[in-house]
Amino acid sequence: MFVEEYKVTVGDINYGGHMGNERALVAFHQGRIAWLNSMGYSELNIGEGIGIIQRESKVEYLKEAFMGDILSVRIADVILKRSSFRIKYEIKNQRDEVIIIGDTLMIAFDSQRKKIVSLPKEFREKVERSIENNMD
């Protein structure tokens, strides 16, 4: 659906000499921001002044990543609900090996009213088109 590059830097490395477990969420976040930007959105505004907040995340670590690795963070799928969407991620290393998979549940949130709201219609339509185009 969408791919963003993520380079493993010294700040990503833990005491074990590989990418720290928490850095997967940073890579997911970077991929999500780039994907939203590619559609003209941000986490602060997915249309109609509505932002998104992360409600949950899941990460499965399959292989290690090391300093200097160039990773591909792929938005593999998006599952839309009334006021939320689940993004499924797949991270591959430069050898095209899947090293991390996971997902995040994002909630549409009106920060002015401090309330969960429905996904904006235009956002929903753009994401649905993106999903359909990926299936072709």
Image: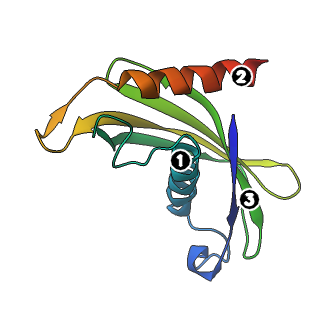
Marking on residue 131 = none
Q: Neighbour class for label 3 at 10 Å: few (<14), some, many (≥20)? A: many
Residue 83 locus on image (x, y percent) = 31, 24
Q: Nearer the viewer, mark 3 or mark 1?
A: 1
Q: Secondary structure at mark 1?
A: helix
The amino acid pointed to by label 3 is Leu
Above-or-below relation of 28 to 47: below
Residue under the image location 39 percent in, 38 percent down: 46
Residue 102 locus on image (x, y percent) = 57, 40
CA–CA distance between discs 2 and 3? 24 Å
Q: Which comes sooner in the sequence, label 2 or label 3? A: 3
Residue under the image location 53 percent in, 26 percent down: 126
Residue for badge 1: 32
Q: Nearer the viewer, mark 2 or mark 1?
A: 2
The amino acid pointed to by label 1 is Arg
Above-or-below relation of 68 to 85: below
Residue for badge 2: 133
Residue 71 locus on image (x, y percent) = 74, 59
Q: Secondary structure at mark 3?
A: strand
The amino acid pointed to by label 2 is Asn
Q: Which comes sooner in the sequence, label 2 or label 1? A: 1
Which residue is outermost to the left? 113
Locate the C terminus and report the quarter of the image it occupies: top right
Quarter of the image where one finds residue 20: bottom right
Q: Secondary structure at mark 2?
A: helix
Q: Neighbour class for label 1 at 10 Å: few (<14), some, many (≥20)? A: many
